Image (spheres, rainbow, N blue to C red):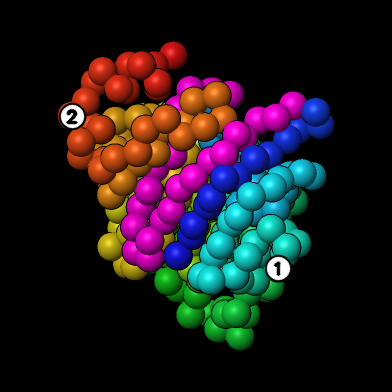
Amino acid sequence: MLSIQNLNAWYGTSHVLQGIELEVKRGELVSLLGRNGAGKTTTIKSIMGLLPKAKGQITFNGTDLLSQPAHQRFHLGLAYVPEERRIVPGLTVLENIRLGIIASKRRNQERQVIEEIADTFPRLKERLNQSAVTMSGGEQQMLAIARAVACDPDMILLDEPSEGIMPVLVDEMFELFQKLKQSGKTILLVEQNVEAALRIADRAYIIDQGAVVHAASAASLLADPEIQERYCAV
């Protein structure tokens, strides 16, 4: 579904990504791991077209993404959940979810989509009419994910979803990711919680200093503490 070859990206004159290569197959959950500053978020933003300068090749469902603006990448079936969540203040939980439906291919099925979201995210079902910004950080993160799921994307890009979240909600969140995968969703997950990410992933890539330094099945990486320590330990 997603193929990246020789991806290079810059912030100003800083050459951050240096020849990234990875792929995600339909129905997979792939984890992208590495220390802070390794280039994980930059990779996600490059896929979504949110960097001013990127070169190489990114193909999604056979379409060259680098020639497409960010909004068109959304319409091609990519949904992005940034680390900062971007919940819209002044709107309720329900209204934030509706934002994910308005521009999607399911905009004429709003009632059905809301019912599906309520079933998938029971914690949000109890809070649909609550002001979104009054919820906890973990609940707001779930709302950001729900908004992305409401678009019915082909692939969801998740950037550090467990960052700053209380442990009980982290467990609930990773159970949700497994549930989404089992429903057929394809997911690329950037995550600092290495063990939790590997337990639910099919495969994983490790990035260090802007390059992929290790790629393997999630099970083999989970069983290899030396590699985890070398490239992922703080």
Residue 17 inside the magenta-drawn segment: yes
Which quadrant would the C terminus be assigned to in this image?
Answer: top left
Work out whether 229 lies above or below 148. above
* The disc label shown at residue 35, or none: none
In percent of width and height, residue 132 lies at 62, 49
Residue at position x 68%, y 73% from top?
103
In percent of width and height, residue 64 lies at 63, 65
Work out whether 193 lies above or below 85. above
- Foreground of the two, 109 or 7: 7
Residue at position x 57%, y 45% from top?
6
Can you name the residue that lies furthest to the bottom here?
108
Residue at position x 59%, y 70% from top?
63
Residue 24 inside the magenta-drawn segment: yes
Left or right of 165: which side holds 28?
Answer: left
* Residue type at the position of mark 1: Gln
Characterize the local packing of mark 2: few (<14), some (14-19) or many (20 or more) Cα atoms within 10 angstroms.
Answer: few
Q: Residue 71 appears in which quarter of the rendering?
A: bottom right
Magenta highlight range = 14-37
- Foreground of the two, 188 or 62: 62
Characterize the local packing of mark 1: few (<14), some (14-19) or many (20 or more) Cα atoms within 10 angstroms.
Answer: some
Residue at position x 60%, y 55% from top?
57
Is residue 172 shown to the viewer in this render?
Answer: no
Write down the residue under mark 1.
Answer: 72
Name the N-terminal-most of marks 2 and 1: 1
* The disc label shown at residue 223, or none: 2
* Residue type at the position of mark 2: Ala
- Foreground of the two, 221 or 56: 56
